[in-house]
Image: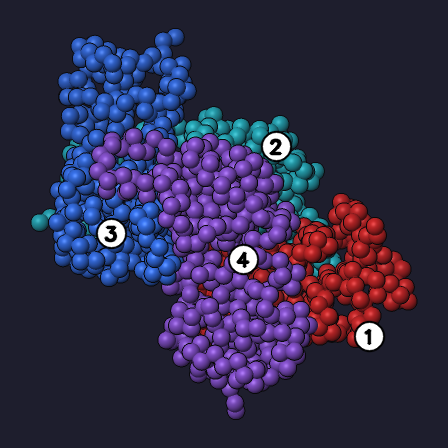
Chain colours: A cyan, B red, C blue, D purple
Amino acid sequence: MAKPLVLLKPAPQKRDRIFTPEAYARLLKRFDVVDYEAHPDEADFARRLPSAFAVVGQPDLDTDSLQSAASLKAIINVEGNFFPNVDYATAFARGVRVLGCGTAYSQAVAEYSLALALDAARGITRADRNTRSGSTAIVSATTSDSILLRRANVGLIGYGNLGRSLHALLAPFHNRVRVYDPWLPASIIEDAGAVPSSLEDTLAHSTFVFVFATATAESEHLLDGAKLDLLPDGARLILVSRAAVVDYEALLERLRAHRFHAAIDVWPTEPIPADSEFLTLPNVIISAHRAGGIPEAFHSIGDMVCDDLELMTQGLPPARLQSAAPELITRYRNKPVG
Amino acid sequence: MAKPLVLLKPAPQKRDRIFTPEAYARLLKRFDVVDYEAHPDEADFARRLPSAFAVVGQPDLDTDSLQSAASLKAIINVEGNFFPNVDYATAFARGVRVLGCGTAYSQAVAEYSLALALDAARGITRADRNTRSGSTAIVSATTSDSILLRRANVGLIGYGNLGRSLHALLAPFHNRVRVYDPWLPASIIEDAGAVPSSLEDTLAHSTFVFVFATATAESEHLLDGAKLDLLPDGARLILVSRAAVVDYEALLERLRAHRFHAAIDVWPTEPIPADSEFLTLPNVIISAHRAGGIPEAFHSIGDMVCDDLELMTQGLPPARLQSAAPELITRYRNKPVG
Amino acid sequence: MAKPLVLLKPAPQKRDRIFTPEAYARLLKRFDVVDYEAHPDEADFARRLPSAFAVVGQPDLDTDSLQSAASLKAIINVEGNFFPNVDYATAFARGVRVLGCGTAYSQAVAEYSLALALDAARGITRADRNTRSGSTAIVSATTSDSILLRRANVGLIGYGNLGRSLHALLAPFHNRVRVYDPWLPASIIEDAGAVPSSLEDTLAHSTFVFVFATATAESEHLLDGAKLDLLPDGARLILVSRAAVVDYEALLERLRAHRFHAAIDVWPTEPIPADSEFLTLPNVIISAHRAGGIPEAFHSIGDMVCDDLELMTQGLPPARLQSAAPELITRYRNKPVG
Amino acid sequence: MAKPLVLLKPAPQKRDRIFTPEAYARLLKRFDVVDYEAHPDEADFARRLPSAFAVVGQPDLDTDSLQSAASLKAIINVEGNFFPNVDYATAFARGVRVLGCGTAYSQAVAEYSLALALDAARGITRADRNTRSGSTAIVSATTSDSILLRRANVGLIGYGNLGRSLHALLAPFHNRVRVYDPWLPASIIEDAGAVPSSLEDTLAHSTFVFVFATATAESEHLLDGAKLDLLPDGARLILVSRAAVVDYEALLERLRAHRFHAAIDVWPTEPIPADSEFLTLPNVIISAHRAGGIPEAFHSIGDMVCDDLELMTQGLPPARLQSAAPELITRYRNKPVG
């Protein structure tokens, strides 16, 4: 009996970054895989689409293509952001699962965010830099602005996969956690043991603020100067997602004035320009979009693809990748990871 | 009615570092306090000792002094290490509580240790340094050695206050935790959900190793070259306590060869000599004895002193400071914090 | 502007059981609600369906009805089980959300299951019964078969909402948890800190076994005599869902022989026949389908309906009710709760 | 070389209840053990005491005896309560460790207390009783007073070993926990994530109240009628320790009037008199002092004795048994477990 057909077009993701050799062998064992990474033959792809069980990647799929795809059960986005080159409405109407791999990065981003918060709380990166540069300041001078995370007020801007994963890591710290997420009812936040709050209250009452907001038309410059002014003196602002939600000019101005500390992983222009003033500030941890993209996260994408395609061949729903919400899929304004 | 007498000689600790104004006012409200910080009048101290309820600090207290101290209920060490200038045996025999403030630092050290581990796992400090120096390396090049803490093998060398506090913070990471502590029976470690192990197994099977060992005659150079060679390639070694337990020459040699990563907070010579080769290594996070001494930790000492002295005036046992173990008090070989 | 139209046909669920007065007032404030509970007017329902925003309940909805329902965004099942009186395929093809309220019961069932397990571990119900009947047996006689849950081997048969909710409650008990769930890949179970296992291993190595399996054609009598024989002597078997997965004749035989203990909440015939031998056994806790149906659970259904309908009117996806999986919706063989 | 001498007089505890055969063999391997259980030869005991390393049990030890005990390092109470037949002051002055085994019961009591609370919340024991008696009441009639533990207000009266062990089990329930403990400063309770409260506030604001108070002169009838009247209607009162702190007449009166529910494990007269009206009440779970005394708890005492005696022969402090507080040892008014 023929194996189900999988069309592999992972660009801009790379096949060998997401599939370990073992995972790829596992995929080949159960599926006929046509790999277009090396040879992006559009005509061949169009010819095979009608008999494909799944497409892995995010190639252009217009209405006609999808209507031709009589056997298609899944379109698996392995890059992390949904772009408008697919006619999602037709996919949904035809019962094709549109699956995203966002959860692959959640743990990596959550651990990184916690690391940034603790580092900003204690000045670890700054002290390493200063000591290497010859500082022999006495300890109490280098720790005078150090604070504990335990029992601190914490704010989460956005409570999707990233916010929830970070929240789980905070459990032993007994924080009071405020959450702002306009896409969720208060009950979900309360049941998770946090306090549903307005954006203003979250900023004004939190010593540690984690920004995990999705970029949409509504969230652009959500954190402008007026909002940043709500932060308590000496707050720690952890920016991991997305640059578009912050006004970086306003942010720079406040950091320059030492109003608070920041750890920043996302930037309006990447790579960070060499002359960026942020690079000169002592109260900032500089990180160049490193929170999610680590080997274990990438490899988990390949494993998730194998797991879920195998479930789907048994007539079961996918269990690891996330089904995209039809209501949201066209609202995201994310840029692809370079 | 006269208030109980407290003799305050906190040196080398400082009074205002451990007592907030509120805490000191609270102390004064309930106790007659004679503060010898500014005026270290030995004769006055000796004259008042017989009527003292408690001594806060670690002044010389020989057998005769203690036998004269008819009302003494507590000697409260506010510095963190017990030195042999007190006749502890006589204190114990007379029912005087010998109390230590080690737990004041536990949370600060635990949070710092977790921060160092996550930073070493993800190269945060290194990347900040490199980016500030102009590196625009692509992300995947800077994260190729990044690893998750989740489900990693973790080893704890020493399971006292520090080890337990750190262990509590690891709960959400679902690690397999091996513990080496020769002062504890296996059952205590098992009941805490960890695996009691030999030093060798702990080193050989742990990706993250936290060193929290007390300095004693037996633990000197516990981690010599042969032991360090047991660490897996690419391990993360977090040294927060005590320098004496590690052979730094052997450590330097292995770090120079990029055998593993380290985050180091304690040093055989402090301040770290400006020409130390450690300061030049990319796979090390340099920290100059900063793990415990932060304002919240210092202030908690004063709060603990107030809490426990108040309990003791009610005939209750102290609840926050730790009663020194007579069996161990003469075995410590720690150096005072500068 | 007109409010969106909601057609309310909750039978066999009752309106006032799921909506508190506050919740119902909230629903009326945002929606035009036509309540068919008292007046089940089929013609009126058919007439209004084309302009309905949502149907709350599980009335018959065939292909034609659904095709007429041009504005329909959601069919909200408030009873707990999906029945074949709805043409789900057409609903999915038209982009209508089919939402279930199963999570409303999860916490109630999880707490109840833990209660049953601890009760079975310690003989609480049995001892209450015996003491009320005049027994003055010495304590050690009544506790000789008592066991701790801490660090015990635990097996979960089924790892959906119920299994996961129970698993969360076990965290402080440091168990080794084995999970059998044929609908999930091993990775999901491992990431949750449990051990993916076969049914046989789960039964053979677990002192506490929780049955949360869904009734399907495949799971009928999953736990037959041969499987039950795998349980260790003195095991505690907690049956909360679903009776169809167990061979009760085989179960009775083993309980009669005191092979293990059981706490049973689901029964092949409900109410439990008065002459059931189960009612006479000392090593059984008798519970008559009480695990989920408590006021807080019922009321949470109404709250979830309000929360999610409000989100959907804003163009957001539902966040509390669960979207039914097209792959599974026709496989369930559950009976309605009486 | 001679093995250290251990004198074993565990009465009223029994040797084979606390030592498994393995534990006793382990004890014999490292120590010369003289077992007085079968042959309580007082003269022999007095003759050997001067060379004894440890006494296991609670025999009479007056000043002279203790002064004769030149090698004595530990008196290990294996019963659970300290009685005034030992001159503790002399023991402390001579540096003899006075060790208690209370922690052996903590987990057993904590699990039992949680079981009682969940059972009282859901009417499990009551429903089992009624169903066995022929009731076929519909489910919603038997669950109308059922409540969840999740996010409920919880009060702990007493925060020693028992209170802390129970608190740990509550972590997944996200409760607001108030603690009343007059022997502790507020900071300890706050650091544990709970709210330090007066007795009155704890009672008035808690749906679940756990009583873990020690019996002292001060705590007698701490919970009298006026205090019990503070409980919210429908509260669940869990009494596990100690009967002396409650006025049972006042309690009975309120339970008879269905003001709240109770689960009671300790009684002013034990065994519970056959004609006690408590035995007839539907809103009470009857338990006859069963919370702690289970095989695993008893056996852990023997294991703790072995662990700590072995540590002490190495010059290390005991790590599992608890050193009695000189300040408290004469304040307890507990009765021995029968």
In this view of the protein, which residue sits in the foreground, D135 or C172? Answer: D135
Q: Residue at x 20, y 45 (%)?
A: C279
The spot of residue A194 in percent (x, y) is 49, 37
Disc ID at residue B64: 1
Q: Residues within 10 Å of mark 1 (few under 14, many from 20)?
A: few
Query: Which numbered disc, 2 or 1, marks the residue closer to the eye?
Result: 1
Rounded to the nearest angstrom, the CA distance separating label 2 from label 3 is 59 Å
Question: How far apart in space, not on screen, are marks 2 and 1 (Cα)?
Answer: 58 Å
- Identify the residue position indicated by label 3 in the image: C282
Q: Secondary structure at mark 3?
A: loop
Mark carried by residue A204: 2
Task: Give above or below for A37 relative to D225.
Answer: below
Image location (x, y in percent) of residue D199? 59, 41
Number of numbered discs overlaid on the protein picture: 4
Which residue is most to the front?
A: D275
Q: Are marks 2 and 1 on the same chain?
A: no
Q: Is there CB contact under 8 Å for labels 4 and 2?
A: no
Q: Is residue C46 visible?
A: no
Which of the two discs, 2 and 3, sits closer to the camera?
3
Three-letter amino acid code at disc 3? Pro
* Amino acid type of the residue tagged 4 in the rendering: Asn
Query: Mark 1: which secondary structure?
Result: helix
Chain under numbered label 4? D
Q: Do the residues marked 1 and 3 share a common chain?
A: no
Check whether the beta carbons of the residues at disc 3 and disc 4 lie within 8 A of each other.
no
* CB atoms of marks 1 and 3 within 8 Å: no
Q: Secondary structure at mark 4?
A: loop
